[in-house]
Every structure is written in structure tokens, then in C-alpha cells.
Amino acid sequence: MENLKTSFGKLKVNQSQKTKKVQDVFSNVAKNYDLMNDLMSFGTHRLWKKKIIQLMNIQSGDQIIEVGSGTGDITNLINEGFCNISLTSIDLNLDMLKQRKNIPNNRNKINWINCNAENQPFKDNFFDKYIIAFCLRNITLIDKSIEEAFRILKPGGCFFCLEFSSPESPLINNLYNFYKKNIIPLIGYYVANNKEAYKYLEESITQFPHQEILSSNLNKLGFINTSVISLFNGIVSIHKAYKI
């Protein structure tokens, strides 16, 4: 693994180095993470996250896992809207987990776990729903994490991924590329005092596979009935897939 290369933004690094580099980025921005999300997306990330929760069709008794939960805003939204479910919220970065909201456990059982999406400490066929939002592109071995998602989902379970994507309109794509490359790093510099971290953010979005490629990978790794919902002309997409 030491000599195998992968992308860290536009850089090519050893696979063994990427995980630490990504975690260093998130440790450095953890305190300003939620504020930066609001500023960079003009608050629209909250609408995107509510949309994916609506699509999940959460039922009483569901076992739900959120992977790469960060500060736990999606876990919090699910907890506020539903009762009699079990929530497991995992993240590899302890600094991000320390920023999580003070979410009451009196509505649902919530477990917070520090672990890697590529190697999760759960038994096979355990969860009804798996959700990963704005995290998949940061994982070193993306296919390995998808294989883990497939393993821990029950037959009939559903995989949901919310991730930045490719706009459908060339005009919007050009404007979006300008915004990512020039404005986001400046916001990172003035608000989070970390231009380089948000330069990586821009590069990681640009390097991430197109919607159709990700859907194809989900099919190759065992999922069926994959579908994509584009939001804001494809700036972000929701991928949905089932395990049988």
C-alpha cells in the first residue's frame, strides 16, 4: 500500500499518507466547520440535508448509521424528526466529534463512535439505512468504504450519499468552478484562517467522480436500483442504492 498513489486534491500521495493529511485538514477547521458550511453554501447545505432525510423514508425501529458525521447536524435532524429509532454516528476525526451538538438521547438511542469508514466495527446485515454526506470524496479507499456499507446493511437496506457533483449547465459549471477556485479559499482565509484547507476542499470536489461514474461503481460493488437526484443543477447529488 505504501507505493500506491491516490489523489489528495490535485496532489498525488501515497495511500498511506492521504488519511492523515485529510484528518489534519479537518482537525484544523473543526471549530469553524459549521460556520464555514453556512457561508460557503449560503445556508443551502441545510436544505440539501433535509432533502436527503425526506428521501430516507425512516420507519419506527430503523437502525440508521451516519458515516462521516462531523459535528452531527444530520444525526440531530433525524433525532428531532423521528422517534423509536437507533442512530449510530461515526467519524474518524476526534476533533470533529468534539464539536458535535449536545443532542439529547431521550428520543432515540444514539451511539457516537470514532472509527474509519473503510473498516467499521459492526456485524454483517445490521443497519436498515446508511447515510454519508460530504464525506465520501475524503476517504482514501472509496471502494472499500462502499463494500463496508454493503456488508453492514441488511438485505433490503438502503444506501444514501449526498455529495458535491457536476452541474448540468455549462454556464453554471463555469460559474461554479470560478467560485470554488477563487472564492471558497478566500472565505477559508478570512473566516477560518486556513486558505490551504479550503483549497483542498475545492480540489477534492473537482477530482471526485461524476454522478454516472459513482452510480456505476455502486452497481459494480453489489448495489441495485441505483438512482441519482441532482440538486441545484447538479452542484450536489443524492445517490440512492439498495442491497438485496
Image: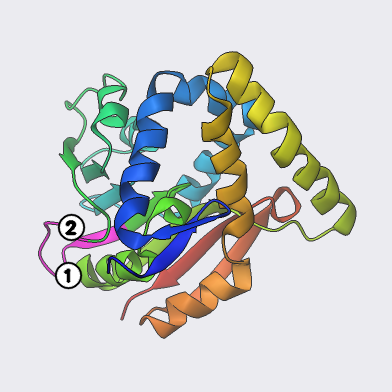
Q: Position of residue 171 (x, y in %)?
A: 89, 52
Residue 59 placement, left or right of 41: left
Q: Is residue 179 above or below residue 168?
A: above
Q: Which residue is labeled 2 in the image?
A: 120
- Image coordinates for residue 45, horizontal then vertical, percent: 57, 36
Q: Is residue 113 above or below residue 225?
A: above
The secondary structure type at the circle numbered 2 is loop
> Mark 1–mark 2 contact, CB under 8 Å?
no
Q: Is residue 108 magenta?
A: no
Residue 26's disc number: none
Q: Residues within 10 Å of mark 1 (few under 14, many from 20)?
A: some
Residues 174 and 2: in front is: 2
* Marking on residue 125: 1
> Which amino acid, mark 2?
Gln
Q: From what the image shows, is residue 25 above or below residue 135? A: above
Name which residue lies at 76% across and 53% down. Answer: 233
Report crowding for label 2: few under 14, some 14 to 19, many 20 or more residues within 10 A (C-alpha): some
Q: Which residues lie in the magenta part?
A: 119-129
Query: Is the stretch drawn in magenta largely helix, strand or loop?
Result: loop
Mark 1–mark 2 Cα distance, whole angstroms, equals: 13 Å
**Amino acid residing under circle 1:** Asn
Q: Residue at x 35, y 29 (%)?
A: 27
**Going 39% across and 78% down the picture, which residue do you hit?**
223
| Residue at image location 17% in from the left, 26% down from the top | 106
Question: For numbered disc 1, what is the local secondary structure?
Answer: loop
Residue 69 visible in the picture? no
Residue 243: % across, % down: 33, 76
